[in-house]
Image (spheres, helix red, strand yellow):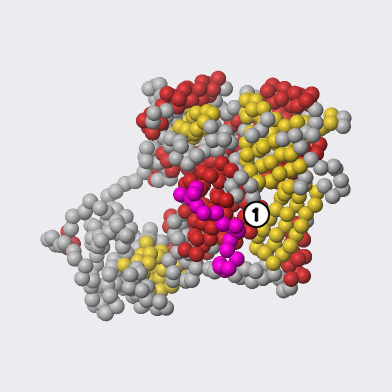
Amino acid sequence: MNRTLVELAHAMLMAADLPEFLWEPAVVHATYLRNLSYTKPRAKMTPYQLWNGRKPNVAHLREFGAPIWVLLQGQQVQRKMLPKSQRKAYIRYNEGSKSIMYYNAATRNILTSRNFRFLSKADPSPPEELGIQLSAPLEGENGPPYEGELEDGTRSTAPETRTGNPRKRKAQVNIDPREPRRTRGIHKDYRYLHDPFPDEKKAGMLCVAKEQAFSTIQAFNVIPGDDCHSLKEACASPDWPEWEKAIQTKLEQLRWMGTWKLVNKPVGAVPIANKWVFTKKRNKEGVLTKYKARLVTKGCAQCLGHDYLKTHSPVMQLETIRAILAIAPTRKLHIQQMDIKGAYLNGMLKERVYMQQPEGFTDGTGQVCLLIKTLYGLKQAGREWNSELDTKLRRCGYARLHSDPCTYILRIGEEFAIITVWVDDLLLFAMTIRLMNKMKSDIKAEWEVTDLGEPSKIVGIEITMSKDSIAISQRRYIESILKKEGLERANPVGMPLDPNTPLEPNPEGNEGNRSNSFARLLGELQFIANATRPDIAYAVNRLAAYTANPSLQHVGALKCILRYLSGTRTHGIVYKALPEEPDFFYGYVDASYGNADDCKSISGYVFLAGNGAITWSSRKQVSIVLSSTEAEYVVLSEAA
């Protein structure tokens, strides 16, 4: 019985997308349902009926976590034009008080209310119950309240259309899935209940969201609204001839590399769907350089333990590339950039995975693709490509850094060369031209690559090289964010945050910005702060503390950062050639004691090389300290 209840509770939490700490009320709700359900030993009587001697009334049953609208009461500030109810998550029903318990996500508390309605925003009135024979309460039994029932027992006066016998109502077209209904006589094939793609066309965009997000993080050279999001959209665009050439080029590459072979579909196999992803590649000046089409599998349909085992794959740390760029002017290093074509297509697939034929380019035979090599979108694709890259570079004599698994060093006498890897983008550093040519030969002997010459952009960071210095910035990326937010002509300000306006948490009861725009924009600014702009690191991390419930004040502070970036969009970090001295690398640390809402101190540090910052941080300390001296020791430990 314990396992039965725990598995029921786990399923309810997962289906309702509720936090894990609600396991206790979930188990209580599961127990309550079991007591009202039939069991195998006594198929004609429920445990409730055996104990109480009467049939239970199940009209009040609702799904755990179902949306429920609760009347707002006890507000300190009454405003006539504000909503009088808020949507919460239903937890369980209290029989004694005829009330319900609900979960308040803003305060993370479980509360009780007698003033509630099971309505969604789209339903003007409660949907009628369908095909269920409700047993009337026996004599002396107080039935639970119906939807919209008031505290004094009267029913709501919401208009309803009643025709004929209310116990024999016909099902309406719009059915509320949370309403109880008759399921007897409906046979379901439980083998397909976990199929995440019952309708491939409807699930098309959902399954590649992560792959498109990864592609954006990988390049950061895409202008918003500049790409096609489906094959149908690409066919209708004026650039379809260019997109068609890109698709044919990709298909030819997949055939040449032997990515799959066509086989008859095995019995019981569920081939993974795929989708075309289109991107216009631009350089740091924003000039269109390439139309790129990529075939992406819907890896979210893969099953752990069957289609894949491990997925972890490392990426290059930004601190590593900044440190090497800071050393390059002083050591007079030669720098080149290379791109590996179809990097993920080089990984060998260990599992047996079937895929549908490419979208829009099937041969009509009904055969499926048995994948031999990895494709973009597979959960293990990054791991297999990194394993392939590591094996071949080690075979050529390159040593892998322990501090950064995506950085390799080759030493020949007193000379050295460095390769940094970000998925398929490589930066090559060498002391001599001869060593640079050797690195390029080693890489071209293993993979098909594009030699890009001197680097101009890597991981969304624009690189400007001169004789005695290297500068990095993100002007194009900042301009794309400003254009998307409509602030490209905003009046600039002198500081990221206004020192005269203290930031405060959103008071309870005030409705904050519930859209994802705040978190999305904050994530974009976080990337800028982590890559090239330490001057906004404190402001971004300060606002990150209010992501769960941002107020209008926090949104205004976020726009203040954008106005600051509007006036400093060309700013970046410059690394200069300096004589190698013992203090070539140096840093500063500091702490602000008790400078946060929860009395935690703020740690800040920055380390420099070549007169430019290579690593920095500004964040809240984990623990509460008792003095400013202790706060200083904590930040020293974090920076060490």
Q: Residue at x 45, y 60 (%)?
A: 513
Q: Residue at x 46, y 37 (%)?
A: 226
**624 versus 566 height, above or below:** below
- Judged left or right of residue 22, residue 75 is left
The amino acid type of the residue labelled 1 equals Asp
The quadrant holding residue 365 is: top left
Q: Residue at x 56, y 31 (%)?
A: 374
- Judged left or right of residue 330, residue 466 is left
Q: Nearer the viewer, residue 494 or 161?
A: 494
Q: Nearer the viewer, residue 413 or 99?
A: 413
**Quarter of the C terminus within the rendering:** bottom right
Start-end of magenta stretch = 486-503
* Location of residue 247 in the rendering, given as x and y in whole percent from the top left corner: 47, 25
The quadrant holding residue 318 is: top right
* Location of residue 471 in the rendering, given as x and y in whole percent from the top left corner: 69, 41
Q: Residue at x 29, y 57 (%)?
A: 122
Q: Nearer the viewer, residue 469 or 115?
A: 469
- Judged left or right of residue 566, residue 52 is left
Classify mark 1: helix, strand or loop. helix
Q: Which residue is mark 1?
A: 535
